[in-house]
């Protein structure tokens, strides 16, 4: 019933994220209220709700064994149960035409506006920032790949500047200028590869501070006035303004405050004490206390490790950084110092620099190796079919999956959009559903979108990935495999559909573990120029690095998850405490060694919970990581060098975790694979926190 609108709108939403233009944004915002209203009409249909309730009741009174004897029957029961729960959370129980229903629907419409504005503001603020560096001493010892990326960014900036000024001669000159990575100038932006390179490698503290604060103040009161003035000037160029209501504005602080008030109000209309309760009604975690307990269990191990890690980085800065890092001049490392000195500590500890690894991680080789892993453990061949379908950008590629156990049958396809494009593509990485498997709709070949923001090719060099970008690619592919290798044929529970949010990260985080498996790594780690394999000693150091900084990384994720949960449970959006007071309060618990600076507006860019689906659900990453680590433990138990054993466990993983989708409850899926409930022991062991 929902497919025609859902499919059309999913394409528009996808393009809005990867090919964002003023024209598309305008049409998207104009049509979004209509889509929301149609969705609410479906979700609040009492006729449909009563029909589904009657169907569920008939199943409950029928013979239980007969009703659940087949996978198809189980899917249908889950689909109906999930739909009824979803409709309840969409307000179907509110009396038709009542003030409560009217207000609930007003809130839903406003949410759509606010979340879109939030996302657009982050994208616009990211695009607006740029810092040009001209002094070679400021970039001393910065990796060549970063210098080349920044030098190319400066050339693109000059081209864009000339276009804005309407100066064709200047534009032609900029387009033809020779980029010199060694001489510059260099322009640092806030898209992922550029920002991370600056934080990890830029030796000039003042430059790092400007870039850090540029990132942490995006779409906040610090940047909103200038952005709003530019937007107003652009609007005034038009002949008339059709906007009848006041624009939402570029300051995400105000948007967050309104979102939190509306979420609390909406939860109250449905009888919940807070939005967190409402969110958890459709997740594995039974309550906020369960989330807190798991977080604190991990914190007990992670916090001491994080404090030791920061102390070691600080000692190195004091010993080798010169007078500006002396204790008298700098009592403690600032946030814009931490990543830089942690990276120097990693290089010193393992005698291995990230730049030395990049030549072995060319995108094409990584894809070939990853596809080899998929064939090895899941018996599925991935074939390049780029050029056979229409794409939204020349960088986009298209692949098809074929089941080797079924005579090479074509079973799924996916698009891959691998590179960062700060001009029109939002940051981060994600998998999205293009087409899902559905017997009712006659769709037997699911299609996925895999989107990353990795390092693009520069000059005549291919995309040379950081190891973290390799892990991200494996992560998103894990999501894609659950969508594409599903056996579920009831659309509402096929693939990732119907999977509880705090279980959906299981396959993605599971796939990351293979980045440290020797046969997998040597399936792709070859020098892009010579074809020589990654030296053995470098691979051993890479494995040793796996747990480096795990304490600080775990504490950071715990902070994000519990800050999200606190905002949606105990925080009073109408009280005296501000959202930034809460951020500091939670940081004192989870990252007391690194409290936020006065200007920190991280929440203004926290799109996961204010423009995505993770509100009162960011904890899901850690919740699912417990399951993913334990699942990978099954492969470790048979021995990763035991090829037959790995294939056998891989077959079982495919038949359970990847095949059953949302057709079976995630705990039952896990127990079908592992034979028991998950344990956090494997996660702590993998992170070196035991």
Image: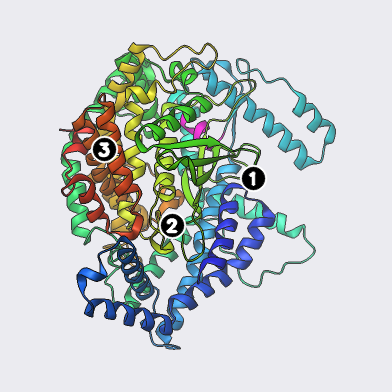
Question: Where is residue 24 drawn, in percent x and y?
Answer: 66, 56
Q: Secondary structure at mark 2?
A: helix
Viewer-proximal residue, 445 or 422? 445
* Residue 649 badge: 3
CA separation, marks 2 and 3?
38 Å
Q: Which residues are magenta?
A: 189-197
Q: Is residue 402 above or below residue 227?
A: above
Badge 1 or badge 2: first in the primary sequence: 1
Q: Main secondary structure of the magenta part?
A: helix
Q: Is residue 189 above or below residue 589?
A: above
To which residue does mark 1 refer?
Answer: 389
CA separation, marks 3 and 1?
35 Å
Question: Please, which residue is most extreme toward the right here?
Answer: 169
Residue placed at 32% from the left, 82% from the top? 54
Check if residue 192 falls in the magenta segment: yes
Q: Quarter-wise, where is residue 516 in the image?
A: top left
Q: Is residue 623 above or below residue 552?
A: below
Q: Is residue 680 left or right of residue 243?
A: left
To which residue does mark 2 refer?
Answer: 610
Question: Please, which residue is most extreme toward the front here?
Answer: 407
Check if residue 15 falls in the magenta segment: no
Asked whether the viewer can see residue 358, the reply is yes
Q: Is residue 369 above or below residue 123?
A: above
Badge 3 or badge 1: first in the primary sequence: 1
Asked whether the viewer can see residue 687, the reply is no
CA separation, marks 1 and 2?
34 Å
Residue placed at 46% from the left, 46% from the top? 430
Question: Where is residue 441 drawn, in percent x and y?
Answer: 51, 64
């Amino acid at each position: 019933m929902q497919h025609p609108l859902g499919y059309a709108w999913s394409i528009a939403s996808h393009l809005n994220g990867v090919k964002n233009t003023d024209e598309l944004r305008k049409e998207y915002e104009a049509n979004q209220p209509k889509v929301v209203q149609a969705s609410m009409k479906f979700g609040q249909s009492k006729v449909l709700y009563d029909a589904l309730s009657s169907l569920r009741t008939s199943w409950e009174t029928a013979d239980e064994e007969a009703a659940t004897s087949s996978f198809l029957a189980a899917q249908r029961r889950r689909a109906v149960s999930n739909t009824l729960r979803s409709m309840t959370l969409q307000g179907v129980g509110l009396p038709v035409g009542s003030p409560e229903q009217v207000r609930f629907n007003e809130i839903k419409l406003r949410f759509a506006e606010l979340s879109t504005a939030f996302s657009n503001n982050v994208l616009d603020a990211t695009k607006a920032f740029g810092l040009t560096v001209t002094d070679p001493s400021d970039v001393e010892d910065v990796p060549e790949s970063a210098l080349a990326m920044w030098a190319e960014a400066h050339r693109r900036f000059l081209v864009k500047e000339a276009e804005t000024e309407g100066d064709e001669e200047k534009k032609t000159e900029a387009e033809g200028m020779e980029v010199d990575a060694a001489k510059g100038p260099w322009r640092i932006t806030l898209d992922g590869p550029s920002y991370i390179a600056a934080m990890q490698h830029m030796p000039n503290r003042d430059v790092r501070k400007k870039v850090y604060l540029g990132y942490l103040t995006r779409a906040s009161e610090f940047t909103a006035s200038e952005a709003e003035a530019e937007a107003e000037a652009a609007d005034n160029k038009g002949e008339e303004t059709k906007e009848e209501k006041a624009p939402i504005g570029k300051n995400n602080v105000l948007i967050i405050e309104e979102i939190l008030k509306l979420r609390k109000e909406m939860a109250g209309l449905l009888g919940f004490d807070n939005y967190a309760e409402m969110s958890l009604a459709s997740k594995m975690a039974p309550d906020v206390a369960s989330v807190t307990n798991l977080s604190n269990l991990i914190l007990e191990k992670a916090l001491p490790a994080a404090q030791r890690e920061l102390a070691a980085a600080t000692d190195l800065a004091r010993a080798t950084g010169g007078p500006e890092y002396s204790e008298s001049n700098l009592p403690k490392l600032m946030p814009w110092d931490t990543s830089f000195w942690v990276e120097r500590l990693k290089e010193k500890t393992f005698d291995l620099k990230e730049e030395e690894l990049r030549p072995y991680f060319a995108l094409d080789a990584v894809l070939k190796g990853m596809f080899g892993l998929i064939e090895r453990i899941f018996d599925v061949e991935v074939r390049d079919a780029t050029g056979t379908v229409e794409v939204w950008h020349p960088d986009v590629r298209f692949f098809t999956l074929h089941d080797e156990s079924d005579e090479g049958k074509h079973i799924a396809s996916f698009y891959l959009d691998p590179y960062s494009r700060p001009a029109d593509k939002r940051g981060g990485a994600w998998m999205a559903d293009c087409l899902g498997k559905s017997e009712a709709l006659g769709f037997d070949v699911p299609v996925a979108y895999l989107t990353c923001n990795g390092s693009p090719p520069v000059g005549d060099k291919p995309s040379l990935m950081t190891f973290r970008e390799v892990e991200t690619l494996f992560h998103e592919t894990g999501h894609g495999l659950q969508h594409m290798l599903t056996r579920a044929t009831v659309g509402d529970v096929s693939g990732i559909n119907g999977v509880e949010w705090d279980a959906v990260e299981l396959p993605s985080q599971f796939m990351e573990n293979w980045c440290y498996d020797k046969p997998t790594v040597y399936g792709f780690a070859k020098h892009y120029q010579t074809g020589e394999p990654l030296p053995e000693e470098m691979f051993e150091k890479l494995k040793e690095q796996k747990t480096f900084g795990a304490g600080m990384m775990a504490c950071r994720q715990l902070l994000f998850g519990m800050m999200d949960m606190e905002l949606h449970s105990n925080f009073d959006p109408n009280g005296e405490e501000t959202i930034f007071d809460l951020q500091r309060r939670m940081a004192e618990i989870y990252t007391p060694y690194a409290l936020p600076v006065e200007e920190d507006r991280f929440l203004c860019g926290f799109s996961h919970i204010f423009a995505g689906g993770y509100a009162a659900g960011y904890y899901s990453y850690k919740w699912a990581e417990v399951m993913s680590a334990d699942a990978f433990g099954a492969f470790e138990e048979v021995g990763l060098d035991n090829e037959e054993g790995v294939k056998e466990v891989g077959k079982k993983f495919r038949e359970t975790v990847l095949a059953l989708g949302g057709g079976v409850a995630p705990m039952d899926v896990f127990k079908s694979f592992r034979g028991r409930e998950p344990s956090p022991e494997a996660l702590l062991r993998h992170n070196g926190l035991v």
